[in-house]
Amino acid sequence: QVQLVESGGGLVQAGGSLRLSCTASGFRFSANTMGWYRQAPGKQRELVARISSGGITKWYAESAKGRFTISRDNAKNTMYLDMDRLKPDDTAVYYCNVVRFGLDSRIDYWGQGTQVTISS
C-alpha cells in the first residue's frame, strides 16, 4: 500500500533553515508527480510546492518562491523541501502528497505530517 513518511520538522528561529524529507513506498515513485502541502492552525491545507516525476518541472506557491526549493531523488524514493529564510507564518504541519488516478477516480495519499515551528 502507499506509504509516505515525512521527517525533518522542528523548531527554528525566524531566518533559519530546515530540510524536510518524504520517503515513499508502495507505488512507482519515479512515475508520479509529488507535492508538499502545509496546514496552519485554523487554516485550510494549502499546496506549497509540486515537482514532476522526473524532477524537471516545479511549481511554488507565491509564499514559497525564492525561499523554498523542492527536489527529489528517484533512486531513493525520496522528495525534499529545503526551506530558507523561514518566517513565523511558515509555522504549520507539512504533508507529503501523491495523487493516484484510476479510470474514473482520484485518490490523494498523505503522510502523517511533520511539524514546523518558527519562532520570532
Image (tube, rainbow, N blue to C red):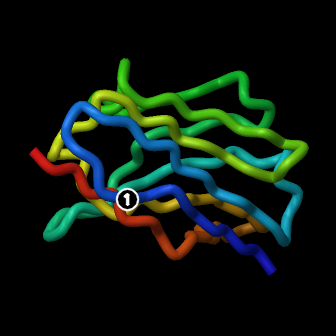
x 57%, y 71%: residue: 111
Count every numbered label the image shows and give the total.
1
x 25%, y 63%: residue: 44
What residue does disc 1 label?
Answer: 10
Furthest toward the left, the residue is: 120
Image side of residue 110 versus residue 14, left or right: right
Image side of residue 46 versus residue 88, left or right: right
Closer to the camera in the image, 72 or 99: 72
Closer to the camera in the image, 104 or 113: 113
Tell me the amino acid under the disc marked 1: Gly
Identify the element where label 1 is drawn.
Answer: strand
Residue 68 figure quarter? top left
- The N terminus lies in which quarter of the figure? bottom right
x 53%, y 41%: residue: 81
x 67%, y 46%: residue: 79
Image side of residue 47 versus residue 73, left or right: left
How many neighbours does mark 1 have within 10 angstroms: few (below 14), some (14-19), or many (20 or more)?
some
Residue 80 figure quarter? top right
Percent x, y for residue 55? Answer: 73, 30
Closer to the camera in the image, 49 or 81: 81
Percent x, y for residue 65? Answer: 36, 23
Furthest toward the bottom, the residue is: 1
